[in-house]
Amino acid sequence: MRAVDFYADCMKWEGTVWYRKEETLRLPTLWDKLFYCRICSGSKRDEYTYEYYLLKEKKDYDMHRFFLALVGVLDGYTAEKQYKILKRMETIKLDFDLSEDEMRSASWNPNPLFSVRGTCGQEKTCKRDCACRTIYFESCCHDGKVGFSELASITNPQYYAFLTDLVVWKALCPDLDALFVMHDCPPSHYNCGRLNYRYAFVIKDNRITYVKGTKKVERLYHIYNKKYPCDTSETENRIQEWCTEPVEFHF
């Protein structure tokens, strides 16, 4: 389904008005609604088109947290940027369907290990100092490249937190081709320094697809890790120092 429909029930009204200024407003509403008004120049002199854009929280309890996560992320942007993100979310397809039990177990580890590999397609032209988006409060881009592996800095992160980061990142960087992998438990002597591959999200071609199955996720990880390598030495050293019985491993 469209990403915007995943997060909320969406309704729109369009028409024309006269003698108005161009503007985008987020109108005040109750906490379970987002209401936008966009006015721009029309095809005729002194004519302006308008679009009212209403998003209401879905009744499903599990979706309540996704809606609030979206509101929380959007609050960090101007009303005009919020509107543009939502419009882009109308074109992003989201393949994410979990049972109620699966929805409540995004990670088995309180501070899980995860990786991102890919490209935004704008490494040479981006003017945002390579820090346009974060996941778990970690910058997605380093040294002009998309990619990092890190332990989550928040405890027990859930799907609604990082999936929303991925959706908004895709909305901001439409050429994004990336893979998010949840390793969950860090490598240790218990698993001989091997990485886990619990599930992944493929972000490509206006689609975000949830992938599960260890072999499928591992295969995707090796493809993206080889195509878009990045420096993970700092994280490797930190995990090795953290283990009571250190074991050497590399991403």
Image (spheres, rainbow, N blue to C red):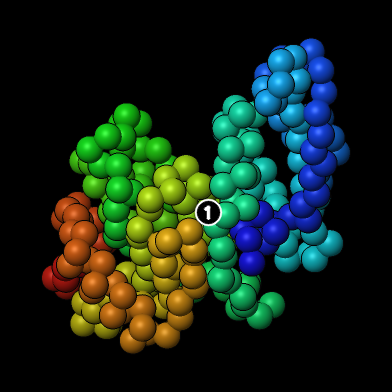
**From this viewpoint, is residue 100 visible?**
yes
In this rendering, is residue 50 above or below 199? above
How far across and how far down the image is residue 237, in percent? 18, 57
Figure check: 36 above or below 63? above
Is 190 situated above or below 125?
below
Depth check: 209 or 249 in front? 209
Q: Quadrant of residue 31?
A: top right
Q: Residue 170, how many percent across, how many down? A: 47, 51
Q: x and y percent of residue 83 in the render? A: 64, 36
Q: Nearer the viewer, residue 138 or 71?
A: 71
Residue at the spot 58% in from the left edge and 38% down from the top edge: 84
Most foreground residue, 27 or 234: 27
- Is 103 left, or right, of 39 in this rendering? left
Q: Which residue has dot 1 on it? A: 167
Q: Residues within 10 Å of mark 1 (few under 14, many from 20)?
A: many
Farthest residue, direction front = 44
Could you tell me which quadrant the N terminus lies in?
A: bottom right
Q: Secondary structure at mark 1?
A: helix
Residue 213: % across, % down: 42, 85
Image point 49% across, 63% down: which residue? 207
Camera sees residue 161? no
In this figure, what is the number of numbered marks? 1
Quadrant position of residue 244? bottom left
Q: Is residue 206 left or right of residue 190?
A: right
Quadrant of the rendering where the C terminus is positioned = bottom left
Instruction: Please name the residue shown 36% across and 83% down the image.
Output: 216
Instruction: Indicate the amino acid at tag 1.
Output: Val
